[in-house]
Amino acid sequence: MTTALISVSDKTGIVDFAQALHALGVRLLSTGGTARLLLDAGLPVTEVAEYTGFPEMLDGRVKTLHPKIHGGLLARRDVPAHMAALAEHGIPTIDLLVVNLYPFEATVARPGCTLPEAIENIDIGGPAMVRSAAKNWRDVAVLTDASQYAGVLAELKAGGIGLKTRFALAVAAFNRISDYDGAISDYLSAIDFDAADAEGVPARSLFPAQSNGRFVKLQDLRYGENAHQQAALYRDLHPAPGAIVTARQLQGKELSYNNIADADAAWECVKQWHTGAPAQAAACVIVKHANPCGVALGASALQAYQKAFQADPTSAFGGIIAFNVPVDGAAAQALSQQFVEVLMAPDFTAEALAVFQAKPNVRVLKIALDGVQRDGPTPWARGQNAMDVKRVGSGLLMQTADHHELQRADLKMVTKKQPTPEQIEDLLFAWKVAQYVKSNAIVFCADGMTLGVGAGQMSRLDSARIASIKAEAAGLSLKGSAVASDAFFPFRDGLDVVIDHGAACVIQPGGSMRDQEVIDAADERGIAMVFTGVRHFRH
């Protein structure tokens, strides 16, 4: 007779699954609350304490840690000595293990969780059983998630669980144990043992003594950044709402490594306007080589796109385009007139999708923003990464992600000439864009659109000159424009260059030893300048 041991913390779907097992003639063993639940459902269940002949003890901490359990799980059916040992000690085999673990991750995520509460939710018997069953995967099928129940039942009804499925279940089991142990390690190694609040909630470092990255592969990629490199795309175990890895590709060729990297840059930039602006609700961002080359606000997706495209039509060719609002037929018709690599939006109308059917190579991604809380309590709730990670030689650089949002109240007016309300709007817009431009960044803007973007230069002077060249090539005037610089001007020469090209107001962090020299230069040239007190390097 096939024997199943069922011991689950999350009891979703377990009664139906156990009933189906019973109908197939499977003997049921269970523990504690799970056993009571199955008994209440009228199922014949043998409680583990009765099975082992050893009572639960230490508040249930010791119940499945018994040779009769682990012998039944670990014994190889194809090794005569193993089977003889089971017979000698009166240990039946266990063929199916259904276990999910104490909710450690959910417990420590709860505000106010104390260290004793966290410790109490570290499962011992469950992981031990899962490891035993997964190690002996040829003989024991181990289920660690309710999503696996239906597939296993289907195979049992068809005659038995295949080896491929057994192996996949074992891999999933070891992955779950790895995730669980990693979460425990992350939590415990971040604790300052001597620091706690009045309720005994431990103080935790943002950067634990050991970092255990855990990611799930979404797909292998054809190649990496270059054709001689290999690559794959992974996601967080629990991706944030509205993140690029939650995208659903509606049509088009397979995404490349560079497509995904550029798409993420465009998407993160456009999400800044997720809730829209009072008068201009739609935002469009066009990215090339991870830098915005055109960003604009408009009354509609079409208008936002037209303005963004106008900013740099040359760079927009073969670009990555993102919207913060659904794309309709009118916008789709305009987009179809140019070569687009990737197109992203929260949604697409049926008319828009019909337009893109004529361009089957265009990669169209739908990324829902419904779950994003613009003012959510955590980066995850706001659809953001909590941490940024950069690989260095045999190590990682980790930092909190740059999600600083400048408020009007944060602006420091430092020049005799004050910016007008319209100029402040342009300055704030330019600042949002500059945050997503590679340093050294210089961004010229006016009327809710970029006019010229200078990115990634070793000299801020060169970035300013490149931005002006871009504007000239696009036939756009920089006269009266607003300029954002991601870092301070260390000398007045950088400020003089942007003013020479037409800037009427400037936003920059400030903080240089020569701030006064730069302020005096602004006063001399008759422009308004504001300090933010915040730098946005993006290397």
Image (cartoon, grey):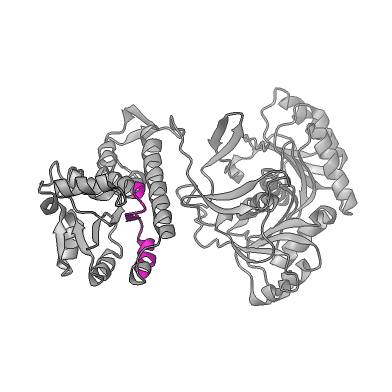
- Judge from the rendering whether residue 51 lies leftward or rightward of residue 381; answer left or right: left
Residue, x 60% and y 34% (percent of image)? 391
Residue 269 in the magenta stretch? The answer is no
163 over 289 or under it: above or below: below
Measured as percent of width and height from the top left, residue 388 is found at 56, 40
Give 377 or 481, whichever is nearer the viewer: 377
In which quadrant of the rendered image does the C terminus lie?
top right
- Judge from the rendering whether residue 406 lies leftward or rightward of residue 434; answer left or right: left
Q: Given the current orientation, which residue lies at the most extreme top position?
A: 513
* Quarter-of-image position of residue 331: bottom right
- Judge from the rendering whether residue 140 lies leftward or rightward of residue 382; answer left or right: left
* Quarter-of-image position of residue 419: top right
Give 393 or 164, whichever is nearer the viewer: 164
Visible residue check, residue 272: no
Residue 142 in the magenta stretch? The answer is yes
Q: Tag count in the figure?
A: 0
In which quadrant of the rendered image does the N terminus lie?
bottom left
Measured as percent of width and height from the top left, residue 26 is found at 23, 65
Visible residue check, residue 160: yes
Give 59 or 468, whichever is nearer the viewer: 59
Q: Which residues are magenta?
A: 134-154
Residue, x 32% and y 28% (percent of image)? 193
Give 409 or 238, whichever is nearer the viewer: 238
Measured as percent of width and height from the top left, residue 152 is found at 36, 64
Measured as percent of width and height from the top left, residue 376 is found at 47, 52
* Quarter-of-image position of residue 493: top right
Residue, x 27% and y 63% (percent of image)? 14
119 over 151 or under it: above or below: above
Q: Given the current orientation, which residue lies at the most extreme front position?
A: 80
Residue, x 59% and y 40% (percent of image)? 410
